[in-house]
Image (tube, grey):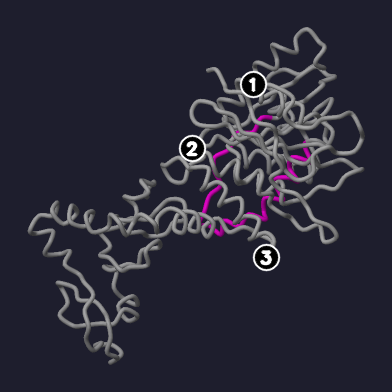
Amino acid sequence: PAMAAPLASLPLLKFEAPQDRPVISEEGLNAIRQLPGPICPVAFVGDGRSGKSYLASKLCGGDVFPTDDSDVAVTEGIDVAVLQSHPGHLVIFDCEGGNNALSKSHSIVTVVGALLATALVFVTDGKASEAAVEALARMLQERSLVKCDGTGSLQAQMLLFVVNQNRLRYNDNALEAILASEQDTEGRELRGLISDAYPQDRRQFFTLPCDGRGDFDARWERLHGAIREAAQPLKMGKLWMTGAQVAEMVSHIEQLLRKHGNVSLPSLHRHVILDTWLKPTVGQVLSSRMDKLLDNFSEEELATQKVGSVSGKCTECGTTGNGWLDPDIDDFFCEDCWRKFSPKVLKCGFCNCFHPWPCGRVEQVTKMWHCMDCLMQLGIDIA
């Protein structure tokens, strides 16, 4: 499909001396924030001075990201460019390169790319060397800054391994051969990191000759098509995220890394969903949603669902306060005591209200239980 002329690249994340503190640039953040969604993010990462900015510019259709032929890295931190696509907008992150002795590399760049991109383009120069394989594996190790704690998951991501200005002859299965090659213990561990992070159906291998070569255009078109196909809309549950939500994620990631040195995915998801999406809307529709929900219950179902908040003296601890009654239990219990033993009333992870357990589900991203009212606002996957 035809694309609109791309914007110039803008700074998104830079570093302030002397502490080398990561700072989000409002220029790039505002460009993302204004997008209505869906957002299709691509991150160019890999070796320093390998042509990442050149390839990112070529994806945009022009000279968008700064490039030159010096030994010093052109990109520090992350620059971003936005162009219209189908669906929504393609958001291209040109990330600072690693493996360059003349420049610093910052882990936060990798973490931001790992969290936001649905297509990760890893670029190395000349050949798929052991150093390049190690650099990719070390980059994945740095993703340990992202703490899942068994309750969150990274966005599904496609790896496109690109040998730019290729000097050797490779076949289409070169990456599989590299990952399967005989190595020492460390080499096997590094390859295991790559294989575990990107299953075979989510990793591809490409080579590009120098751009003066006759087969460059054909090979670029193949890579270009693969990037566009891999750059799927960023989602939270089943719903496409808007630019405002992605911008909120970027800001929150920077804050978490600056304060704690890691990112908790469950808290990140909760922050974006609850504070920037759910709270402003759930109050407006909750009552009408509940009416429709109750209208759909049969008399028999209603008899087992009438669990509500009442005041009384707790049978267990003797305190007076708000608590819960169940149709099958005549005794009154306060909230704290009820939660110790009752499987019938659970606390929603979003709205923090208690509900009968049949009126909710466990959500797949955070593995937390949420009431149906909150889940209906989000339309997200449930276990």
Residue under numbered circle 3? 259
Where does the image place residue 156, in percent across and percent down from the top left?
54, 40
Circle nearer the N terminus (1, 2):
2
Mark 2 lies on residue: 37
Q: Element under label 2?
A: loop
x, y (%) of residue 324?
Answer: 24, 76
Q: Are marks 3 and 1 in contact (CB under 8 Å)?
A: no
Disc on the earlier residue, 3 or 1: 1
Against 236, residue 261 (above or below) is: below
* Real-space Cα separation, disc 3 to disc 1, in angstroms: 38 Å
151 left or right of 116? left
Q: Between 189 and 280, which is closer to the camera in this rendering? A: 280
- Of labels 1 and 2, the one closer to you: 2
> Which residue is rendered at x = 60% and y = 45% of the image?
30
Vertical order, 361 against 223 (above or below): below
Structural crowding at the residue carrying mark 1, measured as other residues with C-alpha within 10 Å and reported as few (<14), some (14–19) or many (≥20)? some
Residue type at mark 2: give it: Gly
- The disc at residue 224 is 1
